[in-house]
Image: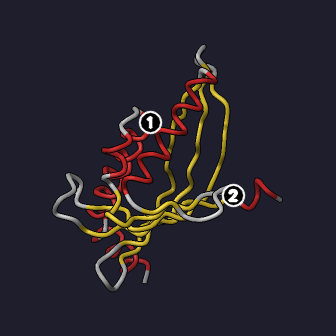
Amino acid sequence: MALTALNQTLDTAPLYVAVQQFYARHMQLLDEGDPDQWAATFTEDGSFHAPGMPQPVRGRAVLAQAVRDTRAKLAEQGEIRRHWHGMVKVAPAADGSLDVRCYAIVIQVAADGTPRLHRHCVCQDNLVPSVDSPDGWLVRSRQVSLDPLATA
């Protein structure tokens, strides 16, 4: 039985690597300040819902504008953010999409380079295959929630 589980893990290794590559590009676009290219990693009607948001943000134009607004606010404070996704769990869905769950750490960095933890979250995405994406995937939906231990 353990050998079967190992074989299933090895069978999904290329998919796991592809998802990791997707997130590396996706988060670097966000952190390096390319809101339009970051938003293009979502489907046209893609949604993003995070703590503090009364409702999900939907659509690439709105997603890009939200990034611009956040970056402007951070610039006024002399800070930037860096995003890290780790402990990524990939589960193929019956429709060909992927359900992905990971931990997300958001680090806020002051102008002098001093980092501080801004937020630790659980991120749940649904990725859909796309021939138009350089990485082969687009985010259909993202649900970010605060880590339950952080709020306990």
Specify the quadrant of the image occupied by residue 10.
bottom left
Quarter of the image containing the C terminus?
bottom right
Q: Are marks 1 and 2 in contact (CB under 8 Å)?
A: no
Left or right? Give the position of 17 relative to 90.
left
Residues packed near mark 2 inside 10 Å, few (<14), some (14 to 19) or many (20 plus): some
Disc 1 to disc 2, how far (Cα)? 22 Å
Left or right? Give the position of 122 relative to 132.
right
Q: Position of residue 131 (x, y in %)?
A: 16, 63
Q: Position of residue 90 (x, y in %)?
A: 41, 68
Q: Residue furthest top?
A: 112
Q: Is residue 120 above or below residue 6?
A: above
Depth order, front residue of 115/142: 142
Determine whether the residue tagged by mark 1 lies in a helix, strand or loop.
helix
Which numbered circle lies on residue 147? Answer: 2
Which numbered circle lies on residue 150? Answer: none
Depth order, front residue of 82/16: 82
Residue under the image location 32 percent in, 74 percent down:
7
Number of numbered discs: 2
Which numbered circle lies on residue 31? Answer: 1
Q: Residue furthest left?
A: 131
Depth order, front residue of 133/55: 55
Disc 1 marks which amino acid?
A: Asp
Q: Position of residue 66 (x, y in %)?
A: 50, 47
